[in-house]
Image: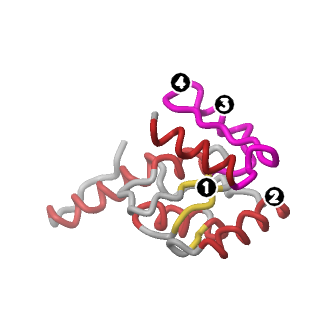
Amino acid sequence: EPYLQELRDLCARLGLIENVDISFTGQRADVREIYTISDLVFSLSTKPESFGRTVLEALSLGVPVVAYDHGGVGEILTAMFPPGKVPLGDQTILQQRVEDLLQARPTVAECSPFSRRTMLDETFRLYQQLAGSNLTELP
């Protein structure tokens, strides 16, 4: 709760409360619905995430994401939505990117290189290489 209040206070000091509809949602069961009504999703952790689930969830629902280009988040954006990448800590580019994306309203590609089928195919291919055999395709 102290961190949440710190964020709310920061938004108030920056004048964001009056100009932007910002929601601090906490844990919720209806995250999908929140993503689908969002114009833009942010992932601005200064520590690299190994996976970047928020980014992948939002992009899979067609919602543009702005995030720092590092860790798993950077890899996901490179593959699925390069316009959302921002160099770590660069506030000037972050601001410009947000303005550009809100004005342009880009479409997020529906094809994800991170699908379950792709993961299964790649894992199976690795097993084939390691086993050195001619295993048949996955069912």
Name the residue that disc number 3 marks.
33
Majority secondary structure of the magenta segment?
Answer: loop
In front of the other: label 1 or label 4? 4
Q: Amino acid at mark 4?
A: Ala
User: Counting other residues with Cα less than 10 Å from the Cα at mark 1, is it few (<14), some (14-19), or many (20 or more)?
Assistant: few
Q: Are marks 2 and 4 in contact (CB under 8 Å)?
A: no
Q: Amino acid at mark 1?
A: Cys
Magenta stretch: includes residue 107 = no
Region of the chain picked out in magenta, as a range: 14-41
Q: CA distance from mark 3 to mark 4?
A: 9 Å
Q: CA distance from mark 1 to mark 3?
A: 21 Å
Secondary structure found at label 1: loop
Front position in the image: 128 or 37: 37
User: Counting other residues with Cα less than 10 Å from the Cα at mark 4, is it few (<14), some (14-19), or many (20 or more)?
Assistant: few
The disc placed on residue 29 is: 4
Name the residue that disc number 1 marks.
111
